[in-house]
Amino acid sequence: EWASGEQVTASAREVPVYSVAPAISVANVAAAIAFYRDSLGFQLEYQEGYPPKFAIVSRGEWTSERARMHIVYAERPTAGTLYFRIGAAVDALYEEFRERGVLIESLPQNTWYGTREFTVLDPDGWTLRFSGGV
């Protein structure tokens, strides 16, 4: 097996990786918890500190496919894009978010690469892309 022109070692094939939990930096962890919980329907799994400086939120079934992320306080947070795979219920999730008053950046649309997607913005400038099958 080859990856990026280099041979994959036996140990790389034998050690499974089941999921990834991105860490996003935010200016106010409590406000981020409230947004992800109240606006996007995530569950708060853990928070540390008062006011909180770290939290873990998640949404979905308790599997390796569950969306889980760490929210970390940063004096100067940086934002980026998170890509959520959600199955075929893209329009239903869009409607859920719209009814909750979430800031929708782009409406659901079919992509040239065979998915249906829409994006929202979180209060710290993170772009959240929700994507599923067409």
Image (cartoon, rainbow, N blue to C red):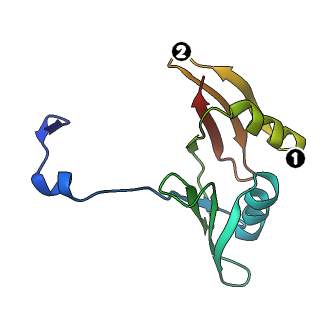
Q: Position of residue 127 (x, y in %)?
A: 65, 42
Q: Residue at label 1?
A: 100
Q: Residue at label 2?
A: 112
On the image, which quarter does residue 11 sit in? bottom left
Relative to 64, is 134 on the left or the right? right
Type of amino acid under label 2: Trp
| Residue at image coords 60%, 40% | 86
Q: Position of residue 66 (x, y in %)?
A: 55, 55
Q: Position of residue 20 (x, y in %)?
A: 45, 56
| Residue at image coords 47%, 56% | 64
Q: Looking at the image, is mark 2 or mark 1 earlier in the sequence?
A: 1
| Relative to 31, residue 79 above or below | above
| Relative to 78, residue 119 above or below | above
Which quarter of the rendered picture does the N terminus lie within?
Answer: top left
Relative to 53, is 33 on the left or the right? right
> Could you say which is closer to the camera, residue 74 or residue 94?
94
On the image, which quarter does residue 24 sit in? bottom right
Type of amino acid under label 1: Arg
